[in-house]
């Protein structure tokens, strides 16, 4: 799982039919201080996330396909949660 923040949305006119009526979002990885790490992923939104929201991303193909109940779906990353709050220990780590 990846903790990230949605940076933007991707629009395409030509794509695989699996992606019809599905929203693709660019998600920046963030560290425990909510700072971007420089890495990102493109993920299918399964929860109604929007730009600027902190999200939880499953970045593993088999798990992502299970979310959509499609064992042959061409998907690797899926947004599975919108994060309201992150609690850290006294040292400030997750």
Image (cartoon, rainbow, N blue to C red):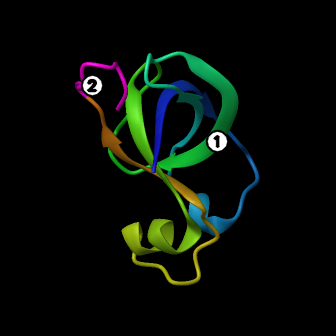
Quadrant in which residue 55 is drawn: top left
Which residue of the protein is positioned furthest toward the right in this rendering?
14
Q: Which residues are magenta?
A: 84-94
Residue 24 placed where, x, y %? 57, 43
Q: CA distance from mark 2 to mark 1?
A: 24 Å
Residue 20 in sight: no
Residue 60 placed where, x, y %? 55, 64
Main SS, magenta region, reads loop
Say which residue appears at 32% left-offset and 45% top-offset: 47
Residue 55 sits above or below residue 8 on the image: below
Residue 27 in sight: yes
SS state under label 1: strand
Please tell me how crowded label 1 is: few (under 14), some (14-19), or many (20+) other residues with Cα within 10 Å: some
Residue 93 sits above or below residue 60 on the image: above
Q: Nearer the viewer, mark 2 or mark 1?
A: 2
Quadrant in which residue 7 is drawn: top right
Question: Taking 18 as reference, is 33 left or right?
Answer: left
Residue 17 placed where, x, y %? 63, 67
SS state under label 2: loop
Please tell me how crowded label 2 is: few (under 14), some (14-19), or many (20+) other residues with Cα within 10 Å: few
Question: In front here: 32 or 90?
Answer: 90
Residue 87 sits above or below residue 57 on the image: above
Residue 10 placed where, x, y %? 65, 35
Q: Are marks 2 and 1 in contact (CB under 8 Å)?
A: no
Image mark for residue 88? 2
As for residue 92 lying within the magenta part, the answer is yes
Say which residue appears at 27% left-offset and 25% top-offset: 88
The residue wearing badge 1 is 41
Quarter of the image that includes the C terminus: top left
């Amino acid at each position: 799982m990846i903790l990230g923040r949605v940076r933007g949305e991707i629009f395409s006119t030509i794509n695989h039919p699996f992606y019809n009526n599905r929203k693709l979002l660019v998600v920046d990885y963030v560290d425990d201080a909510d700072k971007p790490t420089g890495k990102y992923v493109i993920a299918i939104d399964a929860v109604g996330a929007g730009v600027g929201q902190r999200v939880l991303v499953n970045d593993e193909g088999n798990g992502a396909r299970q979310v959509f109940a499609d064992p042959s779906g061409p998907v690797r990353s899926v947004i599975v949660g919108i994060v309201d709050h992150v609690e850290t220990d006294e040292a400030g780590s997750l």
